[in-house]
Amino acid sequence: MKSAEVCFTRNATEGNSVIAAGLMLQPGDEVIFESHAHPGGSFPWANQATLRGVQVKLFDPDAASPEANLARIRALITPRTKVIQVSHITCTTGLVFPVRAIADLAQAHGIWFHIDGAQSVGMIPVNLDAIGCDSYAFSGHKWIGGPHETGVLYIRQSKLESVAVTGIGAHAGELTHLPGEIKLAPAASRHEYGTRNAGLIAGLAEAIRLQEAIGRDRIAAYGKGMATHLLEELTKIPDVTVLTPRPAEMRGSMTTITHARAGAGKLFNYLWKEHSLRCRPVTEQGLQAVRISTHVFNSPAECERVIAGVRAATRAL
């Protein structure tokens, strides 16, 4: 990855929006993405459906295997398909998509491949050159542990001219006189505009340095190890269903569960108020689940508290 291929944004949502608006899709053009996409990933395309008549085609993530998800995407491709987008890791169940295989599929059909990496960068090692996507957006405040209102958008250099600049500022290029044509900078930074908070960017850089010092492989293994323990133990609890995929290559450091008698809000409130456990309610697509995230600052002892809290919830709720 080259420095000219990245620009700073406020979060993954802004990066997703730059791509959705900048590809300048036409009425009837089709975009494929998963039904579990975060609103920050789905709304930019829904907006293009309203503004430009773009057709949105959804597929439900399949927890069975990477190949099953690839087949679901392949089944939706038509000659009008212009974009495939997936969350690298879904915000709902923590499913990890086979992004390298999807990139190969998209390239074979001449389709733009964009990834919403809000839940992946900082949880697992990410090599954009190895993935082969056309664009990738992520937030600095999630698994990287940086400040809010920081993010990065990657656009492969060979595809830079395919993304029109829809928000522009004084440093996007050169304009020698008015009226005249702007000579855009030959870099993704052409999409940066407005005054940025340098302190926030410095905070993001420091968070990245900390993770690099620890080691991204170590962080991924530590978080996934705790998540695997949670998955195995929570599966044993009556009235609890684990939604996170079981195949090791399809999950990272998140574990999502449902309770047979309690919705997302009720289970979330119980775990927080009675056990001081801060989880994330998952209501996308009516899942009524709770997501547990295990990161470098969590401990095995905290995982045991989660298991005990969920056991108690089956008796109390």
Image (cartoon, helix red, strand yellow):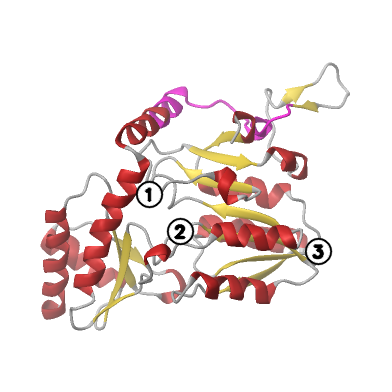
| Residue 295 vertical placement versus 242 (above, below) | above
For discs 3 and 2, the disc positioned in front in the rendered view:
2
Give the structural element (helix, strand or loop) at label 3: loop
Q: Quadrant of residue 210?
A: top left
Q: Amino acid at mark 3?
A: Pro
Dot 3 or dot 2: first in sequence order is 3
Give the structural element (helix, strand or loop) at label 1: loop
Q: Is residue 199 magenta?
A: yes
Q: Tell me the residue that label 1 is attached to.
A: 123
Q: Amino acid at mark 1?
A: Met
Q: Residues within 10 Å of mark 2 (few under 14, many from 20)?
A: many
Residue occupying image coordinates x 63% and y 57%: 103
The numbered disc on residue 270 is none
Q: Which residues are magenta?
A: 185-204
The residue closer to the viewer here, 310 or 21, is 310
The residue closer to the viewer here, 50 or 157, is 157
Dot 3 or dot 1: first in sequence order is 3
Picture coordinates of residue 161, whole percent (x, y): 77, 40
Q: Tell me the residue that label 2 is attached to.
A: 89
Q: Tell me the residue that label 3 is attached to.
A: 27
Picture coordinates of residue 245, whole percent (x, y): 38, 71
